[in-house]
Image (cartoon, helix red, strand yellow):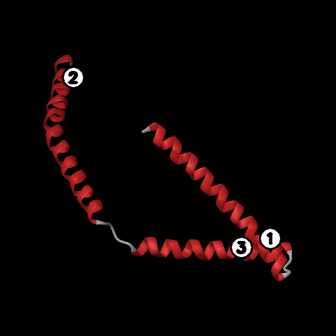
């Protein structure tokens, strides 16, 4: 599992590097092809990134939970209920015993 996580982190690093290189290449292409100034090209790329991020965020908000996620949530809720039901009485007994000890000491 650790090896998978490390390889995934390495892959993510290379992906981010490729995206950064694509941005630099796009900036250079726009600057040379359209004859724009350095600042205006950077602003255009930043605006494009914000629009793309907003579109992805809207899609993420519209997508509801899948079947597996719903089933996992139900299993987690059942496990939590079972845990609280099994743990409540021993805790009550332990607290009562603690109170009895305090009362005996007085």
Residue for point 64% across, 72% down: 49
Residue for point 13% across, 37% down: 89
Q: Give how far apart the Cα atoms at labels 1 and 2 are.
A: 77 Å
Q: Is residue 48 left or right of residue 38?
A: left
Residue for point 46% across, 37% down: 2
Pointer 1 local density, CA inside 10 Å: few below 14, some 14–19, many at least 20: some
Q: Is residue 74 left or right of residue 6?
A: left
Q: Which mark is residue 8?
A: none
**Residue receiving disc 1:** 28
**Residue receiving disc 3:** 45
Q: Quadrant of the C terminus?
A: top left
- Residue 34, position as x, y percentages in the image: 82, 82
Above/below status of 100 relative to 73: above
- Residue 91, position as x, y percentages in the image: 19, 34
- Image depth: mark 1 or mark 2 in front: 1
Q: Give how far apart the Cα atoms at labels 1 and 3 are.
A: 11 Å
Q: Secondary structure at mark 3?
A: helix
- Residue 96, position as x, y percentages in the image: 15, 30
Above/below status of 59 relative to 10: below
The image quadrant that residue 21 belongs to is: bottom right
Above/below status of 4 relative to 102: below
Q: Which mark is residue 102?
A: 2
Residue for point 59% across, 74% down: 52
The image quadrant that residue 50 belongs to is: bottom right
Q: Quadrant of the N terminus?
A: top left
Q: Secondary structure at mark 1?
A: helix
Q: Give how far apart the Cα atoms at labels 2 and 3 are.
A: 70 Å
């Amino acid at each position: 599992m650790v090896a998978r996580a490390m390889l995934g982190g390495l892959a993510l690093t290379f992906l981010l590097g490729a995206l950064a290189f694509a941005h630099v290449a796009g900036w250079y292409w726009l600057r040379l092809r359209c004859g724009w100034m350095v600042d205006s090209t950077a602003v255009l790329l930043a605006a494009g990134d914000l629009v793309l991020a907003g579109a992805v965020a809207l899609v993420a908000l519209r997508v509801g939970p899948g079947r597996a996620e719903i089933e996992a949530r139900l299993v987690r809720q059942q496990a939590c209920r079972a845990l609280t039901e099994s743990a409540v009485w021993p805790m009550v007994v332990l607290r009562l015993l603690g109170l009895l000890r305090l009362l005996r000491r007085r």
